[in-house]
Amino acid sequence: MIMVINVGLKNARCIIFGNEGNVAADYSNSLQTSINNDHVEQSPREWWSQTQFVTSKAVKSVGERARDIEHVTLTTSASCLVILDKNMKLLRDSILVSDTRAIKEAEMLGENVLFREIKKNNGIKSSPDLMIPKIMWLSKHEPHIFEKAKYFLNISDYLTFMLTGEFVTDKNNASKFHFQNDIGEYPYDLMHNLNIQGKEFSSVVPIGSVIGKILPSVAEDLGIPNSCKMVMATYDALSAVVGNGAFEVGDAVDVSGTVTSFRLVSSKKLRDPKDRIYVTPHLNDKDWLCGGSNNLGGGVIEWAKQLFFDNDPNAYEIMQLLVENSQACPGGLLFLPYLLGERTPLWNPDCRGTFFGVNRAHTKDDFIKSIFEGVGFSVLSIASVLRELGGSINKVIVAGGLSRIGIINQVKADMLNTKVLKYSNFETTAIGAALIAMVGVGKYNKIEEAFNAFCTLENVYEPNAVNARIYSNYFEIYMGVYNDLQQSFIGRARLLDKLKLEFIDELVIKEDL
């Protein structure tokens, strides 16, 4: 058996799979997130404690079969900065991928001559969700922490260290630090230029390789065999590509948890002069994965649930019933779902959620439908860029928590004008990590072979031609609204900064008095 630990932005989960894909155990628990405007953080201590908790529960539930667990693998969110001192002690909470505090630092990095040379090779732009701008922000705003910092890690690196004692990562997680795959090095010259010297990063090992044994004390605490070995996978969005069965050119995957990751398998390395998408090597080393993640996918629906239904346990079912017979973009109502700004393809941390076209006749049901559609439009905005650059989308495979809402799957099929497939295996991120590991250790010869053993097709959503035309027309208006509001978004952000500074100054004056 193989045990997969999956730590995302919302939950820590442990799933134990049999060699034929059967789920022997599945246990999860929620994680706490601290959100203060553009600051979004979680506690690495909680990641580890919840990893121990869910893993122990899952192992206990399989009883004596726990002795058959041969391998452990790990998949997590990417671009969540963890900071340790020279004694491997945590210095602060993690700055998450959706945190946008490092906007100015990202702009400064983008203007750096050395960075521009690196970007020519790896094609990865500077943005506040990536690691170097976060480190630059730390150096400027928390110098007492920065001076003590010795190791800069991601979630996966940190948990791997806790499990094995090794500081290792894969090339995709390392790319968030602008690791240069072509020469196999981190950009140390750039970091020295930025006064980020004397720091250490995880060594990069091949995806699918055996890292080593789980630490004996950890294995004993978790109840797994001392002989259990850990295998390198990759971060959650790319693991989910594998777990969704996206192997052929033209296959696209939409993995929607708190955020939505949309990626297309392409035979060409789609180059975008506007830096709107990411392009990374596919696991087969001949094709490319093109696309990226927005800032909120399922998180928008979670917000609507809290807003309209006060966390009613049946909220998702109620929302679907309320909108199942509603028309596309009811009464011309549109919703821009940028509650925390937006990443791919807009890269705008200042934009915010906006309803457009509201009239007196609109109802709560209409607002819920427009929120569903806003999530779809954010995916369409990524797909539109991929098509603009020459990518061809033949089908889309959906997964993650949001894929359980059938109406949203249908909205995406209509908007993308492409059939949408839903597989019965819900935890495709964990499945993808398991498949990578099992091929890596020789349980299967090919990823496709392993996928066919693990996964079965559940539903196909065919696009509605009438709705596809409606959405195509409204998408132009949707993007026009966004473009027209850009200066207002900037003005709003500046005003908030000004008022915040005035408030701080007022407090200082009162304290002085």
Image (cartoon, grey):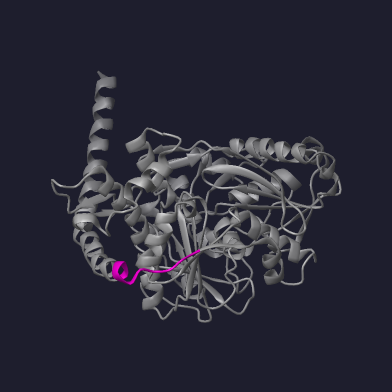
Residue 172: image x %, image y %?
59, 63
Q: Position of residue 335 (x, y in %)?
A: 27, 53
Q: Quadrant of the C terminus?
A: top left
Task: Judge from the rendering whether residue 265 lies leftward or rightward of residue 352; answer left or right.
Answer: right
- The mark total stands at 0
- Residue 155 against residue 115 in the figure, above or below: above
* Image: magenta residue range: 460-468
Point 37% across, 53% down: residue: 103
Asked which quadrant contains residue 47, the reply is top right
Specify whether 485 is left or right of 303.
Answer: left
Residue 170 vs 363, above or below: the answer is below
Q: Is residue 293 left or right of residue 512?
A: right
Residue 499 can be seen in this image: yes
Residue 294 appears anywhere in the view: no
Q: Nearer the viewer, residue 461 or 257?
A: 461
**In the displayed structure image, the side of residue 321 where residue 403 appears, left or right:** right
In this view, the residue in front, 368 or 122, is: 368
x and y percent of residue 327 in the render?
A: 27, 58
Residue in front for this viewpoint, 97 or 432 = 432
Q: Residue furthest top?
A: 513
Q: Is residue 462 magenta?
A: yes
**Along the viewing direction, whichever of 225 and 394 lies nearer the viewer:** 394
Residue 300 on the magenta span: no
Q: Classify 150 as above or below 178.
A: above
Q: Residue furthest front?
A: 325
Residue 211 x/y as whole percent: 76, 56
